[in-house]
Image (cartoon, rainbow, N blue to C red):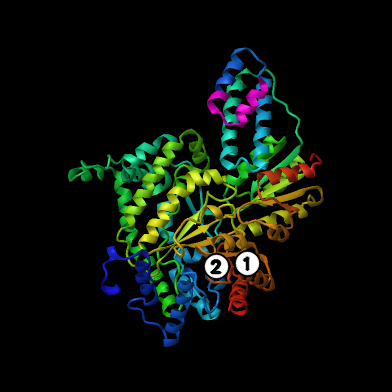
Amino acid sequence: MSGDFANLLADLKEDEVLKLTKERIESGEDPMKILEDSREGMGIVGKRFADGEYFLPELVFSGELLKQVTELVKPHLTQAVETKRLGTIVLGTVAGDIHDIGLNIVDFMLDVNGFEVHNLGVDVPKEKFVDKVKETKAPIVGLSGFLTPAFDAMKETVEAMEKAGLRKDIKIMIGGGQMDDEVKKYAGADAFGKDAMAAVALAKQWVGAS
Amino acid sequence: MDDTTKKWEEMTWQERRDERFKRWLNPPDMKFVSPEAEKLYKERVTRFIKAIKLEETDRVPVMLPTGNSPAYYAGADFRTIMYDYKVMRQAWIKYMDDFGDMDNFMGPGLTPSGKIAEALDSRINKLPGLGLPDDSPMNQFVEGEYMMADEYDLMMRDPTDYALRVNLPRTIGLFESFRKLPPLNFFMMGEAWVAALSDPDIRKTFQTLMDLSGEYRQWQAAHAEVRNLVVSRGYPSLFGGGIMAGAPFDHFADVLRGTHGIFMDMFRQPQKLHEAMEYQLNLLTASLKGFPMTACPICVMPLHKGDDTFMSDAQFEEFYWPTFQKLLLAMINEGLVPMPFAEGKYTNRLKQITDTPRSGIIWWFDQTDMAEAKKILGNVSCIAGNVPTSLMMTGTTMQVKENCRKLIETCAPGGGYILAGGAHIDTDKIENLHAMMDAAKEYGT
């Protein structure tokens, strides 16, 4: 049955997934098992996205399904959910830029792929990135930006990491609308990722999990 | 019957377009600063017209991505020219004086009035000092769910009422009071208006609007003057058709349902979304009837959520293209030249957008593979693009020139190509804009 559940979720069958979730809860099944199956389903979604079978609509809709399943399951959890994480990532849209569509999709994909993500939101001052890296000891930073003013803001954020003595311990990736390898060089980042899956691949590579 | 006496309804779309091209070539009441300026103006417009018609040109035309860079070149910034129309005027004149030969020059048309923007208090369009840092070189849109999932029918029942009483109060602070307006229907006659305006909040909204009219006239006059100055010096405007609405899908995805909302609708209520897009298409095509003779027939249409990364081929085919294609055809039929600006990547899309009349459209590409674009669209549509914005902003003149050379070699043979930037640049990088012009002259003849 668990395989069915994961596949129904991966196939985005909303009604069936929710119905089955309720049935499994009512039958007294361990709610942790339902969450594990959901994670397996999201893994399939991620793979289909990477393979070019799924695009953003499927990705975002699957996230919505996961959210609903989690909400149904939550009241029945007896223990705190603890999952082993691959690594920690600090993520945010750089100062002066208020775009968050791509940011949230990257956050979501990193999360379902096993990373602990600290999403600082939009228009994040460089100091805030520095503070968060110090606090979390995250080895990876993701800088998001959509428009051209983000070029300089990214550069300044990378420089702030350098100044704070953190640069040598972290890897920095950038992504978003007008970003590319030119901007990566300009900003002094380590990599440019063209989409959410590229971010996952880079992160896995950097923590030695790929 | 002679062509010139043919009635508009009897003309083919090409004849209608030729009428609009004539108007573009011969701007009425325009006093050029010199016969030389007039001659150059006509040469430049002709270059673009030939490119649109997929004919060989004397040299590859260039659409420079100047954006707001004149403001920065003059030592000012975006925020300053939103408030100080004199500085704006001087900046644009200085840029023209200093730059020299350009095939077109964008006016400051996308710069709103700061005072008006302050009073409007938009929640969806943020500006420097108004939701963005003072030194921000451009505006930014805040996406959100401004129309709820269950409001499609409400909107289609009466789009005007919906816009005024539901959408405006959600998106623009000044119109918050419009929530309290009675339904704007047939019964909204005579006294009902007086009654509505007896509400102090509603009255305040109208009073603010009236108080802004003087500012608007100043802004409008300053912009019209710069527009005229630009043309009088021989630089055509390519954006004189006015920015038209984009694809019906984006209409809902960008400003009404938002990315998250539209994705939900694609799965949960696809039929409703289709119905609403058809409805929107009909509104748009109806508004095209008797579309005025504008300074230039090109209509820029920014496209967002149909690109390679947003959706699959199948989703584009189902949700994006059908209503957008019909809109393009309706515009072409009126003699207009749609110029979809395909933001992001459209390489996968190319094979899906070939079914339009030959030479009817200019496709302006941002990050699309231009060799593929030439191969697939070259015989159908004029293509424009796509020096990377990152290169324009951070590269050297040599790198820009080299990039232009490759683009010209790939796209120019046989005609139907305009050298353009992937997007506008908004800082002072005049040397890289010069490099683009130089490249067209050196390699594009």
Callout 1: SS: helix
Quarter of the view holding residue B191? top left
Q: In this rendering, does residue B412 appear at all?
A: yes
* Circles 1 and 2: CB atoms closer than 8 Å: yes
Residue drawn at x 57%, y 18% as measured from the top left: A22
Residue drawn at x 62%, y 42% as measured from the top left: A105
The stretch drawn in magenta includes residue B4 = no
Q: Depth check: give the residue in front, B23 or B189.
A: B23
Name the image quarter holding the N terminus of chain B: bottom left
Alpha-carbon span between mark 1 and mark 2: 9 Å
Residue under numbered circle 2: B65
Res B392 label: 1
Specify the segment rendered in magenta.
A1-17
Q: What secondary structure characterizes most of the magenta part?
A: helix
Judge the density around disc 2: few (<14), some (14-19), many (≥20) Cα neighbours within 10 Å.
many
Chain under numbered label 1:
B
